Image (cartoon, grey):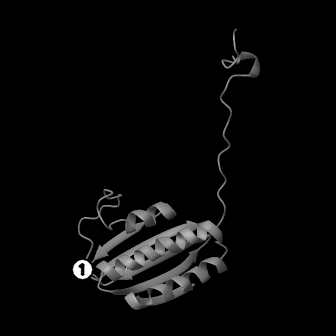
Amino acid sequence: MLLSQPFTGATVTQVRHLLAAQVAAVGLPGEAGDDFVLAVHELVTNAVRHGGGAGQVDLYLRADVLVCEVTDHGAGIGDLLVEMPAADVPGGRGLWLAHQLTGTLTVTGGPAGVAASVSVCLTPQSTPVALDSSPPERDRVDLSADEG
């Protein structure tokens, strides 16, 4: 366990700073680290707004995967849609944003409250090599040449 911290609305900023320090310490700096911290921050603020005003953040490593779980004791999640609301709708983007920033989002609800978690792999993933599917040079036709 890298971090296990209760929070309330009054301590959201403090928890974000503690989380950011731990995320950097495990080797997730820069934009990827910022995205992960922002995703967790969205889950924390959701717990404050919709989950009874308080909760718990648990940050831990599973092999090379950094996982953060945010739990609260709210009434539940009801119909959960993780999609971008219309532009004229205020709020409602927290879960969508957490998913977009990390690529992972798990939300479970039960009688004891809601648990939402995000994760990120610390080991750089190999990216596929883009193959040039264009024909060889001898078969290419230059359409930009002026015929005049």
Q: Position of residue 88 (x, y in %)?
A: 29, 59
Q: Amino acid at mark 1?
A: Ala
- Res. 25 image quadrant: bottom right
Vertical arrangement, residue 82 with respect to residue 139, above or below:
below
Q: Which residue reaches farthest top?
A: 148
Q: Specify the quadrant that holds the N terminus.
A: bottom right
Q: Position of residue 12 (x, y in %)?
A: 44, 85
Q: How many marks?
A: 1
Q: Which residue reaches farthest right?
A: 138
Q: Seen in the image, is 73 located left or right of residue 117? A: left
Q: Specify the quadrant that holds the C terminus.
A: top right
Q: Is residue 65 in sight in this rendering?
A: no
Residue at 26 percent across and 76 percent down: it is 76
Q: Is residue 81 in sight in this rendering?
A: yes
Residue at 55 percent across and 79 percent down: it is 60
Vertical arrangement, residue 125 with respect to residue 119, above or below:
above
Task: Give the camera-side residue of 90 and 68.
Answer: 90
Q: Position of residue 52 (x, y in %)?
A: 29, 85
Vertical arrangement, residue 21 with respect to residue 90, above or below:
below
Task: Give the camera-side residue of 37 and 65.
Answer: 37
**Residue corresponding to mark 1:** 75
Q: Seen in the image, is 34 located left or right of residue 29? A: left
Q: Seen in the image, is 119 located left or right of residue 129? A: left
Q: Position of residue 83 (x, y in %)?
A: 35, 58
Residue at 23 percent across and 69 percent down: it is 78
Secondary element type, mark 1: loop
Residue at 59 percent across and 71 percent down: it is 33
Q: Which residue reaches farthest front?
A: 148
